[in-house]
Amino acid sequence: MERSVIHLTHCQKEIFCFSVPEVCPSCGEELKGRRLQEAPVSLPSPFTDGHKTSCCLLVAPAHNNLDRDFSGTSDLHTGISNTKGVVYNYTQDGVRRDQSGWALCVSVPLVRPDMFHLLAQWDQYLERFSEGPTWDPVWHKFHEDEHNCFSFCLQFLNSVLELEGQSILTREEFTQSFILPRMRRVSKYTTLIQHLQKHQYYMVDRQEESTPNS
Ligand SMILES: [Zn+2]
């Protein structure tokens, strides 16, 4: 469904494209027989299938926007996956337990794989937390800015942090450390894809610090 982006370097240029060209689009030199360090690699996509994740914070465009419009202005919907890839997410109707619909989203792991005790109890924590009156539409009304999907994820994460004896996060810290860095990457990637859908290549001057093995 998603075309993978290929990244190669040649003549001090970083070249991004959907398929490897015969000749370098910058200098025109044939690309066959180039040095191994210039070999094309596919650029990892920032998107994951949320239903294949375990204990992750998931961020997806709201309203199942398939254009993957992650530009900063578009609405984002967040949820938390259990160990079986069921995505718990808070909406106006309460907490949904989605088994589909989160196939294209950004995932942020919340539990280290060696935290066995937490992993063993995660599903139970998540279920019990979701059953609380805070998320019951009869008791508490959904509010687009103040009591939303994001509040649900943050409060759940904080309840886990508290159980683990760690300090809790403010909304600001949560956004800054968990959401924004990933969204910036997504936004760069999306811009690149959009460019490649119109033009054959995207080229930039090679940055010294991004040279592998240097
Ligand atoms: Zn070249």
Image (cartoon, rainbow, N blue to C red):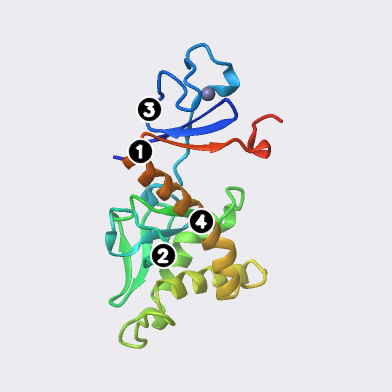
Of residue 27 and residue 50, the one placed in the foreground of this image is: 27
Q: CA distance from mark 3 to mark 4?
A: 25 Å
Q: Dots 4 and 1: beta carbons under 8 Å?
A: no
Percent from the top left, x then y, of residue 161?
60, 68
Q: Residue at x 51, y 74 (%)?
A: 155
Q: Quadrant of residue 213?
A: top right
Query: Which numbered dot is residue 78?
Result: 2
Q: Quadrant of residue 82?
A: bottom left
Query: Within 8 Å: ligand 1 and the Cβ of disc 2?
Result: no
Q: CA distance from mark 3 to mark 2?
A: 33 Å
Q: Which residue is mark 3?
A: 19
Percent from the top left, x then y, of residue 212?
64, 31
From this view, report whether residue 13 is shown above or below residue 31: below
From this view, report whether residue 25 is shown above or below residue 116: above
Q: CA distance from mark 1 to mark 2?
A: 33 Å
Q: CA distance from mark 1 to mark 3?
A: 12 Å
Q: CA distance from mark 4 to mark 2?
A: 16 Å
Whichever of labels 1 and 3 marks the residue nearer the N terminus, that label is 3
Query: Which numbered dot is residue 199?
Result: 1
At mark 4, the secondary structure is: helix
